[in-house]
Amino acid sequence: MKFYYTLLFTFFLNLPFISGQELALVRDNDLFGYIDTSGEYVIQPQFKKAGDFSEGYAAALQGEKWGLINTSGEWVLKPEYDRVKSYNSGFVLVLKDDQWNYVNTSGEILKTPVTEKYFDFNNGVAFYRKAKKIGLLGTDGKLILEPTYNVIKPFYNGYARVRNGEYWGMIDKNGKVYIPVEYSEIGSYNSKGVWAKKGETFGIVNDNTFNPIIGIDKIWDFNDNSELTYARSNKKVGFINNTGKWVIEPTYEKARAFTNGLAPVYKNKLWGYIDENGKEIVGFHFRDAEIFSADGLAPVKEKKLWGFIDKSGKMVIPAAYQITAGGLSLFSKNQIKGFYNGVARVKRGKQWGFINKQGDVLGGKWHQNAELFANATK
């Protein structure tokens, strides 16, 4: 059966600190291996292709066949498959003899109902498709939710957006309706509220009640780092609370989310930072600017290259890098820009590496490519 790949969008503003072993996929001399947070190789580059670790395992290509390795680089599933996807929830999708199956680390096949297309498990749930409708499959191989919706988006914080016909709503991982399917657009789940659009009117859904906001033509998702999110009115952007009240009037051309009490905002072709009272904290000096990380540093762009400032606006790591890249892994689509857990992925010339908050390169090594660090343990 044809494989249907689900792109898992992760909202990176809220990522918690990772415990356990962290490994990053790197490529050197056209082969893939893994380094730890000291920059040293844990698994030497030896694979033609590979994926990020997930719950202790990663897919890797040896010769013309795929298998699954553990954090010691040992084969858990021997390289005998035409494709191996990302391990999650105790199972991994494998392709062999033109047939996709869910298997565990012993290679045992999970028996499931016949499906038109296969989807990865994610946190105990996989999508299940039949007759052009989508339902939910559990790790016991049984349906949690019969195929009901035209579209189910990936779960975020336990909830997923769903669509039937032209209308959107939201369900939980048990398939229970959380927000009725009656909106023309809807945002991702957050406990502070979910933005939605009914007809031509935007508003916030709280306690299953739609609170319309007049004069707004776009709202961005709330996140756990602030009571405010940004919204647009008459081509200008400001910040609202979850009742829809303007806390910072829409006077900016662009904005990004508040983290650590500061948000990047754009006006007159330059970026700066404001606090949650709308006070300018870091002047409008930059060609581009990203959010502050939990490490207290934010990437800013001067001319063509990026450096890092602290919350006072001081440039603590000079603008000498590029920071944005598509995933080199077949599985990872991470787009974190800047510091995360004390390191930042940067590009210098044609090589990629990781720097610490002092600007030192981990292990003194640069690589052909590098993925973000990920929790490699279960």
Image (cartoon, grey):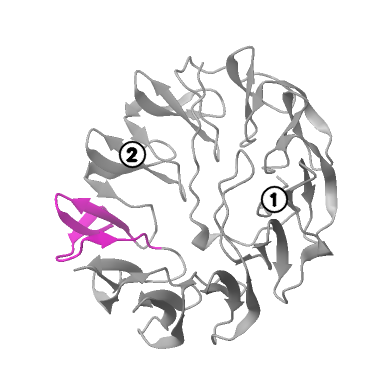
Q: Is residue 90 above or below residue 158?
A: above
Q: Is residue 357 above or below residue 373?
A: below
Disc 1 or 2, which lies upstream in sequence? 2
Splitting the image into 4 quarters, where does residue 277 fall? bottom left
Query: What's the residue at 76%, 41% (across, down)?
Result: 30
Position of residue 211 in the picture relative to residue 238 (left or right): left
Location of residue 20 in the rendering, given as x and y in whole percent from the top left corner: 74, 54
The residue singled out by tag 2 in the image is 162
Position of residue 226 in the picture relative to residue 45 (left or right): left
Location of residue 374 in the rendering, given as x and y in whole percent from the top left corner: 67, 52
Question: Magenta stretch?
Answer: 193-222
Residue 297 at least partly seen: no
Splitting the image into 4 quarters, where does residue 351 fall? bottom right
Query: Is 4 in the magenta?
Result: no
User: Dot 2: what SS?
Assistant: strand
Numbered circle sitting on residue 369: 1
**Amino acid type shown at disc 2:** Val
- State the residue in front, 234 or 322: 322
**Amino acid type shown at disc 1:** Asn
| Labelled pair 1, 2 in contact (Cβ < 8 Å) | no
Q: How far apart are the two marked residues, 1 and 2, measured between alpha carbons?
A: 36 Å
The residue lying furthest to the top in this view is 97
Q: Quadrant of the C terminus?
A: top right
Location of residue 225 in the rendering, given as x and y in whole percent from the top left corner: 47, 69
- State the residue in front, 215 or 141: 215
* Dot 1 crowding, Cα within 10 Å, few <14, some 14–19, many 20+: many
Query: What's the residue at 71%, 36% (across, down)?
Result: 49
Location of residue 362 in the rendering, given as x and y in whole percent from the top left corner: 78, 64
Q: Is residue 264 above or below residue 21?
A: below
- State the residue in front, 358 or 148: 358
- State the residue in front, 190 or 335: 335
